[in-house]
Image: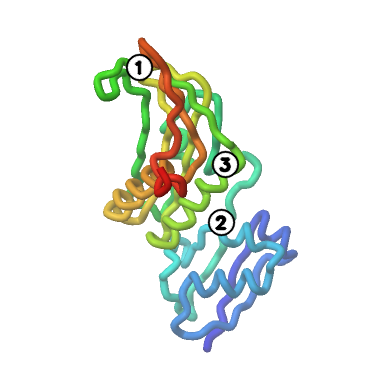
C-alpha cells in the first residue's frame, strides 16, 4: 500500500470543501481506481469527478495509467458555465466544427466525424426537401445510451450527437456525430456503431417530400420489425 495526495481545483474544491485529499491505494492502482475511490469518498461531487481529466506530474493521463508513490496527481474539472450539451435535438443549422469542439480533448489521438446531409435523389426519386420530427426527451436519452455503450466498449472515448428537426433543403446537414478516441481504429468502429444504432433506436422520423408525393420514414429497425 502507498499514500498519494490528490489536488482539487475550481468546482471540485468548492463542492468537497478541500484543496487536496490523501488516498491510501495499492501498488498496482490506476487512475480509474483513484477516481472510483474519490467518488466513494465524495459522492456529492460524483458527476464532476467522473467528467474531470486527471493529470500526473503535470501531464494528462489515461484511465489505465498506473500510479507511482512519487506521482503528483490532480483533477482538472470541466468548466460548467458555458459547457454545451453532448446530445441535442435542435431546429438550428448544424456545424460539424461545433460538435467536434465538444469532444476534443488532450487524450484524443483521433476525432472521427459523421455528417449526414439531405440528398437529392433516393432510388431514382427526386427529393425536393425533408421534414424531420423527433421525440426530443427520449431521443436524447437514447443518444446517451449509445455513447455510454461506446465508452464501455472503447474506453476513453467521448461522443457527441446533434440532430436537426424541421424543414431541411437539399445539402443541408441533418445529423452530426463526433467521436474522440485515443486511437483511430476505435474511432472508425465506434463511429459506424453510433450512426447505425442511432437509426435503430432513436425516435426520429423524416418526411420525404418528392416531386410527385411524400412519405414518413421512421427507424430502420425496432421491436415492430419482426412483426411486419
Q: Residues within 10 Å of mark 2 (few under 14, many from 20)?
A: few
Asked if 117 appears above or below 112 in the picture, the reply is above
- Of callouts 1 and 2, which one flags the residue occurring earlier in the amino acid sequence? 2
Q: Within the image, what quadrant is residue 66 found in?
A: bottom left
Q: Are marks 3 and 1 in contact (CB under 8 Å)?
A: no
The residue lying toward the viewer, choosing from 206 and 178, is: 206
Residue 61 percent location from the top left of the image: 44, 63
- Of callouts 3 and 1, which one flags the residue occurring earlier in the amino acid sequence? 3
Where does label 2 land, which residue?
Answer: 51
Where does label 1 land, which residue?
Answer: 127
Taking the image as shown, residue 1 lies to the left or right of residue 195, namely right
Does residue 179 show up?
A: no
Residue appearing at x 41%, y 70% in the figure: 64
Q: Which mark is residue 69?
A: none
Does residue 227 show up?
A: yes
Residue 140 percent location from the top left of the image: 56, 43
The residue lying toward the viewer, choosing from 10 and 203, is: 203
Q: Residues within 10 Å of mark 3 (few under 14, many from 20)?
A: few
Asked if 24 appears above or below 219 in the picture, the reply is below
Farthest residue in the bottom direction? 1
Q: Are marks 3 and 2 in contact (CB under 8 Å)?
A: no
Asked if 20 appears above or below 202 in the picture, the reply is below
The secondary structure type at the circle numbered 2 is helix
Question: In this figure, what is the number of numbered marks?
Answer: 3
Amino acid at each position: 500500500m502507498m499514500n498519494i495526495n490528490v489536488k482539487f481545483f475550481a468546482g471540485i474544491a468548492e463542492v468537497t470543501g478541500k484543496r487536496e485529499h490523501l488516498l491510501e491505494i495499492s501498488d498496482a492502482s490506476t487512475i480509474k481506481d483513484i477516481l472510483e475511490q474519490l467518488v466513494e469518498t465524495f459522492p456529492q461531487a460524483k458527476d464532476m469527478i467522473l467528467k474531470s481529466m486527471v493529470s500526473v506530474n503535470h501531464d494528462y493521463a489515461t484511465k489505465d495509467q498506473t500510479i507511482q508513490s512519487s506521482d503528483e496527481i490532480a483533477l482538472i474539472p470541466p468548466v460548467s458555465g458555458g459547457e454545451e450539451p453532448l446530445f441535442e435535438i435542435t431546429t438550428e443549422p448544424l456545424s460539424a466544427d461545433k460538435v467536434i469542439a465538444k469532444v476534443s480533448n488532450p487524450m484524443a489521438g483521433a476525432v472521427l466525424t459523421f455528417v449526414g446531409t439531405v440528398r437529392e435523389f433516393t432510388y431514382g426519386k427526386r427529393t425536393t426537401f425533408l421534414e424531420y420530427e423527433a421525440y426530443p426527451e427520449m431521443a436524447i436519452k437514447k443518444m446517451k445510451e449509445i455513447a455510454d455503450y461506446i465508452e464501455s466498449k472503447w474506453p476513453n472515448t467521448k461522443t457527441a450527437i446533434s440532430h436537426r428537426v424541421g424543414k431541411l433543403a437539399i445539402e443541408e446537414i441533418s445529423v452530426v456525430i463526433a467521436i474522440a478516441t485515443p486511437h483511430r481504429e476505435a474511432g472508425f468502429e465506434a463511429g459506424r456503431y453510433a450512426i447505425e444504432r442511432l437509426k435503430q433506436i432513436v425516435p426520429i422520423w423524416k418526411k420525404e417530400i418528392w416531386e410527385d408525393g411524400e412519405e414518413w420514414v421512421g427507424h430502420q429497425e425496432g421491436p415492430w420489425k419482426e412483426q411486419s
